[in-house]
Image (cartoon, helix red, strand yellow):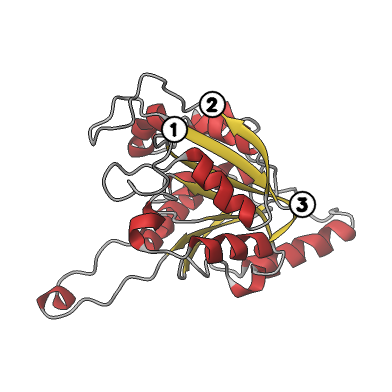
């Protein structure tokens, strides 16, 4: 596993570049297009099964991922989005996958096998990418509160990209201070840095009130909250749209209606 400190590695690579890069071959290049990344033969069957619903090629194109980015995937979960970003960014960058610390179990639960965590899933993906010699960015697990999701070394202008995919709505029923979260992300992004929010679309007027029932959030509600932190909306993607979805059922049609919003820090 790649266990070196990524910032030290970036510094070392910069010094080599200044010296002319004459002493060795360049690292392998990442896949060149979103379609090529999604089509990679070594991607897991589980991820491939999710592709039809999540439209990864369209998502990567919408984000505009660049080689060498430093990215944070908020609420990384099993790492589906984080791995796609790592493949697109390549070995000159890094992808941090954030998850909230789990509460300590008590009694018999504490004595049983530890639960599978986001950090575990990211470590497994990192090992698989390394074993397959995939030219991907390092995947780094971050276990911090949603209100303080960025590693301290990157918290003041250290990020190029933040993604939050299909989880903003959950912050409603979880009681997350979303204003504090968005302010922290604004501070951590460089000027011109990108913040992409993707989620299940709620009906007009519902805000985030159906987060714990229908697992949806109103698009205009998300936009207003993110812009309140200082972000500027630059694009809205329609690749997840399904006008046939009434957005009022716990068992929605497939595909479910969704939205994608791309913000920048001015």
> Looking at the picture, how far across and down is residue 242, in whole percent?
41, 22
Location of mark 1 (residue) = 258
- Tell me how far mark 1 sits from mark 2, CA to CA: 8 Å
Viewer can see residue 85:
yes
Q: At 84% from the left edge and 54% from the top edge, which residue is drawn?
A: 21
Q: Which residue lies furthest to the bottom in this view?
A: 107
Secondary structure under tag 3 reads loop
Can residue 133 be seen here? The reply is no
Q: Note whether 37 is above or below 254 in the view shown.
A: below
From the top left corner, tell me how far across and down residue 134 is, in percent: 54, 44
Return the disc, 2 or 3, that comes first in the chain's sequence. Answer: 2
Question: 29 left or right of 148?
Answer: right
Taking the image as shown, residue 76 lies to the left or right of residue 229, namely left
Local SS, label 2: loop
The 10 Å Cα crowd at callout 3, few under 14, some 14 to 19, many 20 or more, is few
> Whole-Å distance between the Cαs marked 3 and 1?
26 Å
Residue bearing the label numbered 2: 238
> Residue 266, which numbered label?
3
* Extreme-top residue of the structure: 244
Query: Does label 1 or label 2 sit earlier along the sequence?
Result: 2
Front-lying residue, 227 or 92? 227
**Secondary structure of the residue carrying numbered label 1:** strand
Residue 14's spot in the image, x, y percent? Answer: 80, 61
């Amino acid at each position: 596993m790649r266990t070196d400190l990524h910032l030290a590695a970036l510094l070392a690579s910069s010094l080599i570049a200044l010296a002319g890069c004459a002493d060795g071959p360049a690292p392998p290049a990442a896949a060149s297009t979103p379609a090529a990344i999604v089509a990679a033969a070594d991607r897991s069957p589980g991820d491939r099964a999710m592709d039809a619903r999540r439209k990864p090629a369209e998502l990567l194109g919408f984000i505009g991922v660049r080689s060498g980015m430093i990215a944070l995937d908020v609420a990384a979960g099993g790492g589906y989005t984080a791995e796609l970003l790592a493949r697109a960014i390549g070995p000159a960058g890094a992808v941090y996958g954030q998850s909230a610390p789990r509460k300590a179990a008590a009694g018999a639960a504490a004595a049983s096998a530890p639960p599978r965590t986001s950090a575990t899933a990211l470590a497994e993906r990192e090992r698989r990418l390394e074993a397959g010699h995939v030219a991907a960015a390092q995947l780094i697990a971050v276990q911090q509160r949603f209100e303080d999701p960025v590693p301290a070394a990157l918290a003041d202008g250290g990020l190029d990209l933040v993604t939050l995919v299909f989880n903003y709505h959950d912050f409603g029923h979880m009681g997350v201070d979303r204003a504090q979260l968005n302010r922290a992300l604004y501070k951590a992004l460089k000027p011109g840095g990108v913040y992409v929010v993707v989620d299940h679309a709620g009906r007009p007027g519902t805000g985030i009130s159906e987060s714990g029932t229908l697992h949806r959030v109103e698009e205009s509600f998300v936009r207003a909250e993110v812009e309140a932190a200082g972000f500027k909306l630059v694009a809205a993607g329609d690749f997840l749209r399904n006008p046939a979805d009434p957005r009022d059922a716990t068992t929605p049609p497939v595909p479910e209606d969704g939205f994608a919003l791309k913000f920048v820090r001015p």
